[in-house]
Image (cartoon, grey):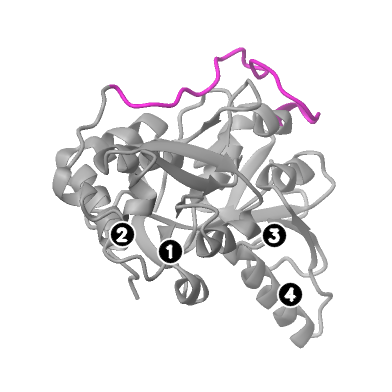
Amino acid sequence: MRINFRTTSVAAGALALAVGIAGCSSSDDTGSEPAASGTAAAIAKDDALAALVPAEVAADGVLTIGTDASYAPGQFLDVDGETIIGFDVDLAKAVAQVLGLEAQMENAPFGSLVEGVKTGKYELGASSFTINAERQLQVDMVSYFLAGTSWAVATGNPMQITPDDACGKVVAVQRDTVQVADIEARSQACVDAGKPEITIEQFQAQSDATAAVVTGKDDAMLADSPVVAYAIAQTGGKLEQVGEIYEAAPYGYAVPKDQGDYTQAVQGAVQKLIEDGTYLDILTLWGVQGGAVTTSEVNPA
């Protein structure tokens, strides 16, 4: 799967990657404007699907959605440092509208989100979750996008790193992502082959992992393929992809279990957006249409 991203400026913490500093700015060194979020028109409520939403969720008219706003282009902070934007955000807002609700995005560390859905702190989790068995034990997962893993290094690849040959190098990754197990297994393979282990540096925010490679602190990073492609586009030629995208898997919304037909309502809303074209419009707006799916599923194997 190859995904090309538009070259608008990234915002807030992600923007800092391009210039090697912390904080917010309204433009990058190309002078382009920040990425915009939002769809062209309001989306109609589907009464049949809305009727499947639990009363305690629908009562206040708001769908509280947990997300980690450090994972551009899925979800990240706009130039005001507060507004959460991204293709995941636009899709989640559209799902809420189909269910007759207004989405309220709440920013939190990635590792806390599934637990937050389980305990009722969030009524939905939308944060580029790769669907896997561990997460499906805790929450229901509704698929809506396809992504793989890819690697990025400093342009020119001065350390001559590949995903299969990173022994002895320092590799950045976001904590609690599926890529942690990936890089840990690769490090163990190095040790088993009598080579130096990989030094794995885990960051709370993906933007910090990317910054570590941009500044030369770390030698490489791995993340979801759309995230790596977007980071490459936004860092002014400082990064390049190395190796191919691998292990493509679906993203899924995290939905609390044992909530009647709530999971089916979310799946139905995604499928409706796919069929009426709104879904592809949103992905195209962000340049991630290469990850589009034609069917949304509940807890796909």
The picture places residue 102, in percent across and down from the top left corner, at: 37, 35
Q: Using residue 107 as the reference point, say whether residue 144 is left or right of it.
A: left
**Residue 73 appears in view:** no
Residue holding disc 2:
262
Amino acid at pointer 2: Tyr
Q: Can you tell which of label 3 and label 1 is closer to the viewer?
A: 1
Residue holding disc 3:
175
- Compared with 228, 38 (above or below) is above
Q: Can you tell which of label 3 and label 4 is closer to the viewer?
A: 3
Residue 229 counted in the magenta span: no
Query: What is the spatial separation of the Cα atoms under label 2 and label 4, in whole angstroms?
Result: 41 Å
Tell me which segment is drawn in magenta.
Answer: 18-40
Residue holding disc 4:
187
SS assignment at label 3: loop
Q: Using residue 64 as the reference point, say whether residue 241 is left or right of it.
A: right
Question: Which of the two labelled residues, at mark 3 and mark 4, occupies the earlier sequence position?
Answer: 3
Quadrant that contains the C terminus? bottom left
Query: What is the spatial separation of the Cα atoms under label 3 and label 1, in whole angstroms?
Result: 23 Å
Principal SS element in the magenta part? loop
In terms of depth relative to the viewer, which is nearer, 192 or 22? 22
In terms of depth relative to the viewer, which is nearer, 282 or 150? 282
Q: Residue at x 26, y 26 (%)?
A: 42
Residue holding disc 1:
256
The picture places residue 153, in percent across and down from the top left corner, at: 69, 48
SS assignment at label 1: loop
SS assignment at label 4: helix
Asked if labels 4 and 2 touch by Cβ distance under 8 angstroms, the answer is no
